[in-house]
Image (cartoon, grey):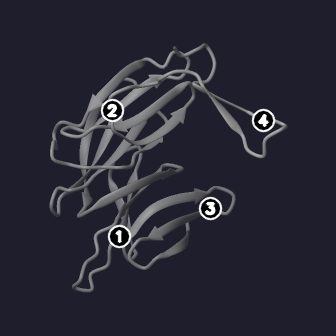
Amino acid sequence: GVGPTAVFEMRNTPAALENTFEFKGVFAESLVVRRMQISGSTLYALKGSNPLRLAAYDLTTGLEMFSIALDAYPTGSSSNFCLAEDRAYVPINNLGSNGRLAVLDLVNRNVVTYLAAGADPFACVAVGRTLYVSNSANYTDGHPSTIRMFNLDTNALTGTIPLQSPSHMVVDQASNRLFVTSWNQKSITAIDL
């Protein structure tokens, strides 16, 4: 079973050249995990399909505390989500040209709304009071893909950044730059925020 400390424990073994891991027990069974993040003492996991669910697990006990189903779009797909304060944001694709961004309230444990997020929303990252959502659609008509910007307080779309096939994103707080991978261009772009 899961002990009162971490689920997995890493320890150095002086005689070996590599770290070894001691198995502490099964944390969660029978789920297809698409992405995980930790906030405080909670592990959040985007799991399953038909519908997708965001589940919250207690890191101490390993028990599922709650899950929120994204059942308004049962055929939707996602492999990413991001956390910002007491909200989670899940880009939902595989909806034709009508991708959505699910806004989840982690306190009340429900879906607040679904926002229009472009043709193929892929990933998101919060910076200050702005949420950036990449749209990895690859248009062949010369129309650029975009990163959409949403206000975290109002959920309003506040702007777009044109960029060819943006996918994964990460923020460097020190330089105030957003780094974005482009799966089609096989590149990383730095954007000053």
Tell me which numbered mark, 3 or 2, is placed earlier along the sequence. Answer: 2
Question: Which kind of residue does numbered mark 2 sit on?
Answer: Leu
Give the mark count. 4
Q: Which residue is mark 1?
A: 146
Residue nearest the observer in this picture, 108 or 155: 108
Q: Nearer the viewer, mark 4 or mark 3?
A: 4
Question: Which kind of residue does numbered mark 3 sit on?
Answer: Asn
Which disc is residue 31 wearing?
2
Q: Nearer the viewer, mark 3 or mark 2?
A: 2
Q: Secondary structure at mark 3?
A: loop
Tell me which numbered mark, 1 or 2, is placed earlier along the sequence. Answer: 2
Tell me which numbered mark, 1 or 4, is placed earlier along the sequence. Answer: 4
Q: Which residue is mark 4?
A: 12
In the image, 108: left or right of 125?
left
Tell me which numbered mark, 3 or 1, is placed earlier along the sequence. Answer: 1
Up the image or down, 45 lies above or below 140; here it is above
Mark pair 1, 4: CA separation: 45 Å
The picture places residue 35, in percent across and down from the top left corner, at 42, 43
Q: Which residue is mark 3?
A: 176
What residue appears at the point 46 percent right and 76 percent down from the top-left corner?
A: 186
Mark pair 2, 4: CA separation: 31 Å
In the image, 126: left or right of 46?
right
User: Do callouts 1 and 2 mark residues in contact (Cβ within 8 Å)?
Assistant: no
User: Do callouts 3 and 1 mark residues in contact (Cβ within 8 Å)?
Assistant: no
